[in-house]
Image (tube, rainbow, N blue to C red):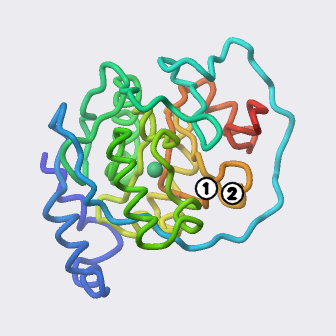
Amino acid sequence: MDKKQHGTKNGISRREFLKGSAGSLLMFVFFGLLSACQSQNQEQKPIETPENTEMTVMEPSTSSDPVLDDSIDLVSLNSINILVNKKHPLPEDYVPEGMIAPDVLCMKDGILLQKEAAEAIKEMFVAAEEEEIYLAIGSAYRSYAYQKTLYENYVKRDGEEAANRYSAKPGQSEHQTGLAADLAASNGNCYLKDCFKDTEEGKWLKKNAWKFGFILRYPEGKEEVTGYIFEPWHYRYIGQDEAKKVYESGLTLEEYYEILD
Ligand SMILES: [Zn+2]
């Protein structure tokens, strides 16, 4: 089955899609590069669309008491629960072992995830398709060197202070774990934009991703906790059991595990 067909099946017509000022670029990205993930070891090049810089309004937290589980390993490099943020970076030379190309629709070649996360994301995409929600992966594993280039480009473009709100410094990106993915609608609607939250795909993910072990890692109104603006596209795999608990708590990973320093 040709997964490219999905891009024109839902709400937005191709003509409407091309109307925007960035239409030609998006057309190139989404109709030119959509492919099933294939390449296993291809180093990614920093060509992706910069993540948006829209500011979000801070909202009061809707937290409940977390139920802590000492068996969860938040620090080991091989743990699917590893906590990575601005205060808990990864070593420069860390590359997760055994990553594979997820067998789902991708927006570029060379997309890799840890095997467990790749298999879970496939299950999630299949379940979404059963509800006529068609998803794609825009970005997954990023090497330290690749993140360094991305970050430096963002600093050049927006200045360091602004870049730090939406881009991770090298070593501080969850993408280096091979457990995080930037997700998109297969038609590219609102990719890496705040408005992704209002798309059918964004809404489906917010409601259902936890069932497959993924959590929305940078929720709205939690910038002071996570260090990053709301990213409705960024999902992190932590396994089904933990994802269920974190989702039901309404907390961020940092709050749930009470690691705020
Ligand atoms: Zn991301």
Image mark for residue 56: none
Q: Position of residue 222 (x, y in %)?
A: 71, 55
The quadrant in which the C terminus is found is top right
**Closer to the camera in the image, 17 or 150:** 150
Secondary structure type for disc 2: helix
Q: Which mark is residue 223?
A: 2
Left or right placement of residue 225 versus residue 129 in this view? right
**Which of the pair 3/169 is nearer the observer?**
169
Disc nearer the start of the sequence (2/1)? 2
Residue at the outermost top position: 71
Left-right relation of 108 to 220: left
Residue matched to label 1: 228
Mark 2 belongs to which amino acid? Glu
- Across and down, in percent, residue 155 comes to 46, 65
Q: Residue at x 47, y 29 (%)?
A: 91
Examine the image and state in which quarter residue 257 appears: top right
Q: Residue furthest right?
A: 65
* Residue 90 % position (x, y): 50, 31
Q: Label 1's element? A: loop
The kind of residue tagged 1 is Tyr
55 up-or-down from 114: above or below: below
Residue drawn at the location 34% of the way across and 19% of the way down: 97
x then y, percent, for residue 194:
52, 68
Q: Is 216 placed above or below 249 here?
A: below
What residue is rendered at 36% in x and 27% in y?
95
CB within 8 Å, label 2 to label 1:
yes
